[in-house]
Image (spheres, rainbow, N blue to C red):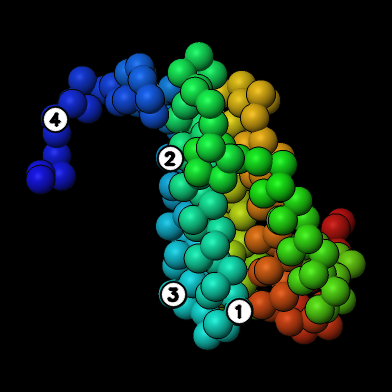
Amino acid sequence: MKVYTKKGDTGKTSLYRGSRVSKASPRIECNGDIDEAQAMLGLARAMTESSELNELLIDLERDLWILMADVATVPSAKKPKTPGSDEVTPEMVLKLEKLIDDFSERFEMPKEFVVPGETQVGAILDLARTIIRRAERMAVKASLSDSQVIPYLNRLSDLIWTLARWQDGNSLKTKSIKPK
């Protein structure tokens, strides 16, 4: 099987279960941002020496496949869904909240603005967080308010921020600046 199909040469691509749209459509741009975030989480995973963080990032990367399927399915093309396979569920959002709570208990939260770059993995996670925030803004632009995509991305960015702080160590070791 060839990797290239030439179907995208006209500037259009197919959505999951259906129609073709411009590659510049908000749904496609949102999925591009999610794909970029997934790759950045993969880079963080490749750089970490923590098996716990490695396993968590693999799970999050797999969740992002589900997220991309949800984003790529327009409401009119949605069939009876298979939660957890092609649709983001409220339970997936709750799982992120529990992870945030768990990891937040492991260190003292910074009380000032954080300057990214204390550790390599923390810096990569901070970059992933900014990409996730961009994906969230694009999900709003794509009018994805009828799904759990926006809440998931919102919690995911919070989790990734928390993981970056966890990787950087407690707030006494984290470089921070006070706002002017």
Q: Is residue 24 left or right of residue 156?
A: left
Residue that label 3 marks? 46
Between discs 1 and 2, the one toward the N terminus:
2
Residue 6, numbered label: 4
Between discs 4 and 3, the one toward the N terminus:
4
Q: In percent of the image, x 53 and y 75: which residue is there?
A: 54
Residue 52, numbered label: 1
Q: Label 3 vs label 2: CA separation?
A: 21 Å
Q: Is residue 151 left or right of residue 34?
A: right
Kind of residue at badge 3: Ala
Kind of residue at badge 4: Lys
Of residues 75 and 142, the one drawn nearer to the viewer in this rendering = 75
At which x and y percent is residue 1?
10, 45
Q: Is residue 57 left or right of residue 18?
A: right
Q: Label 4 vs label 1: CA separation?
A: 41 Å
Between discs 3 and 2, the one toward the N terminus:
2
Instruction: Provide the secondary structure element on which disc 3 rests.
Output: helix
Residue that label 2 marks? 32
Q: Label 1 vs label 3: CA separation?
A: 13 Å
Please tell me in which quadrant of the rendered image residue 109 appears: bottom right
Residue 10 lies, with reference to residue 64, above or below; the image says above
Of residues 114 and 26, the one drawn nearer to the viewer in this rendering = 26
Nearest-to-viewer mark from 4 and 1:
1
